[in-house]
Image: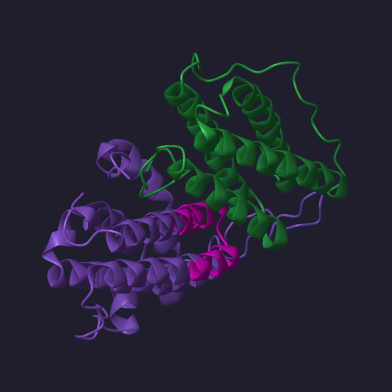
Chain colours: A purple, B green
Amino acid sequence: VPPPSSVSRASRLSRRSAVAGLAALAATAAATVTGGCTGTSARPVAATSTGARTPGRTTGADASRDVALAATVLRGEQRMLGLVQATARRHPRLRGRLTGTRAAHRAHTALLARAVPRSVRRAAGATPHPRPGTVPDDPAHALAALARAEARLARAGVEHAVQARSGAFARVLGSMTAAAAQQATALAAASASSAGQTSGGTGR
Amino acid sequence: VTPLEALQRALAGEHAAVYVYGVLGGRVSSSGHPDLAGRLTAGYTTHRGRRDQLTAMVREAGGEPVAASVSYQVPTAAVTAGQLEAAARVIEQRCAEVYAQAVGSTSRAARRWALDALTDAAVRQLGLGAGPAAFPGVREL
């Protein structure tokens, strides 16, 4: 499987506009939390012909819940990134194979970090690091362990995306979930082909 | 976009996917490229199933399901195995985008369903020669 070229292809400008929604979310939440602004928090929730709430119209309370959710997702992504990096350190020969995986989770954490105010991140605690000895000695097993961790992240991601109040945020979370599912599939395939080889050759 | 509109857009996308997969499946040589033929058949079956589910979901939401067009443009001049695969990849990319939109425009059970469809479209792309992406279905990221 080729490395993701689309990760680096994203233009800064369009990324900025996509992030604006999340940043606005964080700003609303921060204002609500500090009691600085209540102008948007009283907005009624829109009803639709199907009787379902229309996501995207977020109140201040919704926004602060989404920011708390973003902080939770951020910690999960940081944990995954830590595991990928620990695996690359333990198995230098897998470094090339893991470049795309690392880039995807870096992109996720960078985006989420912009939606989560520093104060919320501090309250959530320090960035978790994988315990030493978590990475299996066998490269194929290490890839399989990463694949399982990605699958767990994807399953949790579905629940997080369902919980999101803002539709724009749910869309981004859904995309991150799909990305984790792609990684799970690609890493499991890499593990299987790496187990089939007697030694080396797993680069890229 | 209301939840109903999002479901209608997804249904329109699935009409296109079913048509294009049908065309691609008719062009692939099952003896020459059995792997690809199998993946195209699986794609066709999956999208036909989603089309039927969406039709029911639209009705349930009180809408009249959008009809399929008479024909759709096949994304590339698909003749060789590589071109057929690329055309299927494009279809999955479009479906992923439509479903990512649907995730943002629906809630609860419908959103969960859209998440499943988004993930399936993203993973299916890997079997069609695409690499993993950081933000599948969200083009501006």
Asked whether A169 falls inside the magenta stretch, the response is yes
Q: Is residue B69 left or right of residue A13?
A: right
Q: Is residue B19 left or right of residue A158?
A: right
Q: Is residue B53 above or below residue B30?
A: below
Magenta region: which residues?
A155-178
Q: Is residue A117 above or below residue A7?
A: below
Query: Dividing the image into 4 quarters, which one contains the N terminus of chain B?
Result: top right
Residue B46: give x, y in percent of width and height: 67, 44
Query: Dividing the image into 4 quarters, which one contains the C terminus of chain B?
Result: top left
Q: In the image shown, does A86 or A143 lie closer to the viewer?
A: A143
Residue located 74% across and 20% down the image: B69
Asked whether B137 falls inside the magenta stretch, the response is no
**For the stretch drawn in magenta, what is the main secondary structure?**
helix
Q: For the image shown, how many numbered marks are present on the structure?
A: 0
Residue B45: give x, y in percent of width and height: 69, 41
Q: In the image shown, does A189 or A112 lie closer to the viewer?
A: A189
Does the image show residue A78? no
Q: In the image shown, does B94 or B9 lie closer to the viewer?
A: B94
Residue located 19% across and 60% down the image: A94
Does the image show residue A189? yes
Residue located 65% across and 56% down the image: B111
Quadrant position of residue B139:
top left
Q: Is residue B52 left or right of residue A56?
A: right
Residue A180: give x, y in percent of width and height: 42, 59
Quadrant position of residue A30:
bottom left
Quadrant position of residue A105:
bottom left
Residue B11: give x, y in percent of width and height: 72, 37
Q: In the image shown, does B81 or A68 lie closer to the viewer?
A: B81
